Amino acid sequence: MAMVHPIFSVLVSRPELLVEHFAGYASLAREEASSVGSEVAKRAIAWALAILACTVFLVLAGVAVMLGAMQGDFHPALVVVPGVALAIAAAAAWVARKPLPEKAFSELKAQLEADAQALRSIGTRS
C-alpha cells in the first residue's frame, strides 16, 4: 500500500488547522497591503491620469491638424496646446511606473517560503 504524505493525513484529521493557516495568510496579506495601499492607490490614479491625458492629447492633436489644414498657416498654439496634454501624460506615466518599495509583501513572501521549505522537508523524511 502506498504511503500517504503526512500533510494529507493532518488535513483529513484536523481541517481546522488549514483554515487557521489560510486565515493567517489573509491577515498578513491585508496588513501588508494596507501599508503598501497608499502607494498602489497613487500609482492607480497616476495611470488613470496618464490614460486620460493621452486621450486628450490625441483629440487635441487631431483638432490641431484639422485647424492647420483649414487655415493654411502655422500657429504655435496648434503645437503647444496638445503638447501640454502630452507632457502631463508623460509625467503621470513616469510616476505610475515607479516600482513598489522592496519591502512590499516581504513578510508574506518569507512566510510562503518558510511553509514551502517545511513541506519539502516533510516530503523528504517520508
Image (tube, rainbow, N blue to C red):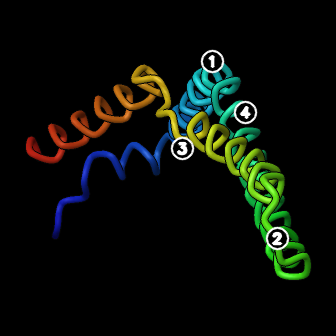
Could you say where residue 23 lies in the image, as x and y percent from the top left?
A: 61, 32
Can you identify the residue that label 3 sits on?
15
Quick one: quadrant of the N terminus? bottom left
Can you identify the residue that label 1 sits on?
35
Q: Which mark is on residue 41?
A: 4
Q: Residue at x 60, y 34 (%)?
A: 95
Could you say where residue 112 lies in the image, as x and y percent from the top left?
A: 37, 35
Q: Which mark is on residue 108?
A: none
Could you say where residue 42 lies in the image, as x and y percent from the top left?
A: 71, 30
* Residue type highlighted by circle 4: Ala
Reading the chain from its start, which is encountered first: label 3 or label 4? 3
Left or right: 101 in relation to 85: left
- Quadrant in which residue 73 is drawn: bottom right
Front residue of 41/90: it is 90
User: Looking at the image, can residue 51 be seen?
Assistant: yes
Q: Are marks 2 and 1 in contact (CB under 8 Å)?
A: no
Disc 3 to disc 2, how far (Cα)?
A: 78 Å
Q: Residue at x 81, y 73 (%)?
A: 62
Q: Nearer the viewer, mark 3 or mark 2?
A: 2
**Disc 4 crowd, CA 10 A, few/some/many (<14, 14-19, 20+):** few
Q: Nearer the viewer, mark 1 or mark 4?
A: 4
Q: Nearer the viewer, mark 2 or mark 1?
A: 2
Reading the chain from its start, which is encountered first: label 2 or label 1? 1
Reading the chain from its start, which is encountered first: label 3 or label 2? 3
Reading the chain from its start, which is encountered first: label 3 or label 1? 3
Q: Nearer the viewer, mark 3 or mark 4?
A: 4
Q: Nearer the viewer, mark 4 or mark 2?
A: 2
